[in-house]
């Protein structure tokens, strides 16, 4: 089921021209919009991921300095966040070529700095139907993380984009389970079990990068897709997460501390191994394979396109 939200969108300005950012920020702040600014591709990605539940309207300078341009950012949003981020391109170049490139990359329309008045930008927001963004039920209500449907939608877009652009070159998937979670539920009750899941979700969220994709898949299972992490780096990261989860607990009746731990499996795939046909990229099979291998990695499985390893956490006692 698709939910329609009338929440006012956040305005994101992505431009390396400080004077332009300040002028546009002043206009939207006067109109009581929440405004976030970024000057780079990476800064914009962090902002988008820092507001995972919010509808957003982004104005993006397509000529950003750095390795990744504004066109790259438009393409990223089109593949991973178009369900909640409506993106407009900004440029000083009014040529047909630039218009074509921006629209193909995913821009709704082009704002030409050299001729369009800044007062048009709030009108774009009002007319963009941002108050009725189709925000599919992609969130897990208990933890606030993406649910599996939201995760799958974003990750499939990311894999398709990687196949098209050749980067990131490698992805790893962590499949995380809570050790002996059924015993916690049976002995301490489901309400406390829910608090354990919330605490683990909070801890995982604190330690993932903005470009990582984290979700609660179901029950006591969590998934993290790690762009640019090979198997070895993902195992090291999983070990760090185990250590961080090992530092936290939940309290029952003010005197009993309930401890818990996690175990994880790892699978890896390179962009050259993502499934495709002559007509289009079909990453669904690649994602399904990653999930299957990570889930079975405790058996030490080594597959053709993904090397896999499972790691169990040490016992915790109190």
Image (spheres, rainbow, N blue to C red):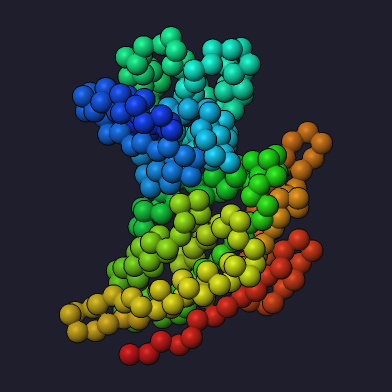
Measured as percent of width and height from the top left, residue 123 is found at 34, 15
Quarter of the picture holding the N terminus = top left
194 vs 2: above or below = below
Name the residue rendered at 45%, 60% in the picture.
208
Report the residue that reaches farthest toward the bottom: 318
126 vs 175: above or below = above
Describe residue 176's horizontal placement relative to residue 206 as left or right: right
| Number of callouts | 0
Quarter of the picture holding the C terminus = bottom left
Describe residue 170's horizontal placement relative to residue 254 as left or right: right
Describe residue 223's horizontal placement relative to residue 193 as left or right: right
Describe residue 7's horizontal placement relative to residue 224 as left or right: left
The reply to whether residue 137 is in sight is: no
Report the residue that reaches farthest toward the top: 115
Name the residue rendered at 43%, 31% in the picture.
15
Quarter of the image where one finds residue 190: bottom left
Report the residue that reaches farthest toward the left: 254
Quarter of the image where one finds residue 30: top left
Measured as percent of width and height from the top left, residue 245 is found at 40, 74
Report the residue that reaches farthest toward the right: 278
Name the residue rendered at 74%, 36% in the picture.
280
Measured as percent of width and height from the top left, residue 4 is found at 37, 32
Measured as percent of width and height from the top left, residue 95 is found at 59, 12
Name the residue rendered at 54%, 80% in the picture.
312
Out of 305 and 113, give the one closest to the viewer. Answer: 113
The reply to whether residue 51 is in sight is: yes
141 vs 126: above or below = below
Out of 240 and 155, give the one closest to the viewer. Answer: 240
């Amino acid at each position: 089921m698709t939910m329609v939200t009338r929440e006012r969108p956040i305005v994101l300005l992505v431009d390396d021209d400080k004077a332009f950012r300040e002028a546009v920020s002043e206009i939207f702040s006067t109109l009581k919009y929440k405004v976030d600014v970024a000057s780079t591709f990476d800064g914009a990605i962090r902002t988008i991921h820092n507001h995972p539940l919010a509808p957003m309207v982004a104005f993006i300078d397509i000529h950003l300095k750095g390795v990744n341009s504004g066109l790259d950012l438009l393409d990223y949003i089109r593949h991973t966040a178009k369900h909640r981020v409506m993106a407009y391109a900004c440029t000083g170049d009014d040529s047909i070529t630039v218009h074509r490139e921006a629209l193909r990359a995913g821009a709704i329309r082009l704002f030409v700095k050299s001729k369009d008045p800044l007062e048009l930008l709030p009108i774009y927001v009002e007319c963009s139907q941002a108050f009725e963004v189709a925000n599919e039920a992609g969130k897990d209500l208990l933890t606030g993380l993406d649910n599996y449907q939201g995760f799958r939608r974003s990750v499939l877009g990311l894999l398709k984009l990687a196949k098209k652009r050749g980067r990131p070159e490698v992805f790893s998937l962590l499949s995380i389970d809570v050790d002996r979670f059924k015993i916690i539920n049976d002995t301490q009750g489901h309400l406390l079990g829910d608090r354990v899941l919330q605490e683990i979700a909070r801890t995982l969220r604190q330690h993932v990068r903005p470009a990582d994709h984290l979700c609660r898949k179901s029950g006591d299972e969590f998934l993290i897709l790690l762009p640019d992490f090979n198997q070895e780096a993902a195992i090291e990261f999983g070990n760090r997460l185990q250590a961080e989860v090992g530092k936290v607990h939940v309290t029952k009746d003010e005197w009993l501390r309930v401890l818990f731990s996690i175990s994880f499996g790892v699978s890896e795939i390179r962009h050259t191994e993502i499934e495709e046909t002559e007509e289009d990229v079909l990453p669904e099979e690649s994602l399904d394979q990653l999930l299957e291998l990570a889930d079975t990695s405790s058996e030490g499985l080594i597959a053709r396109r993904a090397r896999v390893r499972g790691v169990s956490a040490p016992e915790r006692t109190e």
